[in-house]
Amino acid sequence: MSKTVLVPIANGTEEMEAVCIINILRRAGALVTVASVADRLTIAASQKTKIEADLLIDACDTSEFDMIILPGGMPGATNLAASESLLALLTAHVAAGKLYGAICASPAIVLEKHGLLADKKATCYPVFQDQLSNAVPDEAVVIDGNCITSQGPATVMPFALACVSALYDQAKSAEVAAAMLMV
């Protein structure tokens, strides 16, 4: 059975993180929906790469997704945090005990800022670590219950594989890693 994942994107999203997350989860068989929090489908990522979403965030319903994963980047994380539609979806998703994750600036700028890391250990991009209440700064990927966080572009592949493992299992994650020559 395919799992469903929402990956919201915004102007200023770190493109390496967004694309690697989407790619690795799709390799695992997940049905990934990319949703723009901007007022149009195409966003300009942090390094000016254009990325086209599948739909706008307002067309999403949290009950459709097994996991929500936030890429980082600046000002992408700030733009994600400013989306009332995304925050409503994310808050309901977390309250339902479903899987969620964030990388780079997003654990601090989106999750922590909006109370979605309560009692969770987390990591993020080093310059934002002091904004986390339960920071684990020396870990590239931190898994605490249904929440997975990571530090940035260089840690996106292990982060995405941890998401695959949480959605499916370690065997599926190892299979995807092997196909990408990571083992």
Image (cartoon, helix red, strand yellow):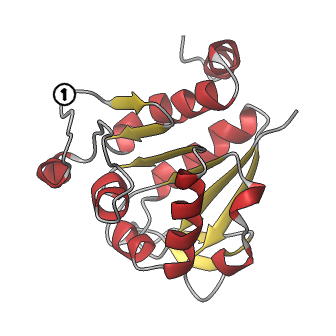
Single out the residue that lies furthest toward the left. 130
Q: The N terminus is located in which quarter? A: top right
Single out the residue that lies furthest toward the bottom. 39
Q: The C terminus is located in which quarter? A: top right
Left or right side of 145 for 153: left
> Does residue 90 appear in the picture of this structure?
yes
Q: Nearer the viewer, residue 93 or 45?
A: 93
Residue beneath the point at 40% across and 76% down: 79
Query: Crowdedness of circle 1 by 10 Å Cα count: few (<14), some, many (20+)?
Result: few
Q: Nearer the viewer, residue 92 or 49?
A: 92
Q: Nearer the viewer, residue 63 or 26?
A: 63
Residue under numbered circle 1: 138
Residue beneath the point at 34% across and 73% down: 78
Residue beneath the point at 58% across and 61% down: 92
Question: Residue 122: percent from the left, percent from the top?
Answer: 30, 39
Residue beneath the point at 40% across and 31% down: 144
Q: Nearer the viewer, residue 139 or 122?
A: 122
> Does residue 52 appear in the picture of this structure?
no
Q: Secondary structure at mark 1?
A: loop
Q: Quadrant of residue 181?
A: top right
Question: Residue 80: percent from the left, percent from the top?
Answer: 44, 71
Question: Residue 140: percent from the left, percent from the top?
Answer: 31, 30
Residue type pointed to by label 1:
Asp
Number of marks drawn: 1
Q: Quadrant of residue 30?
A: top right
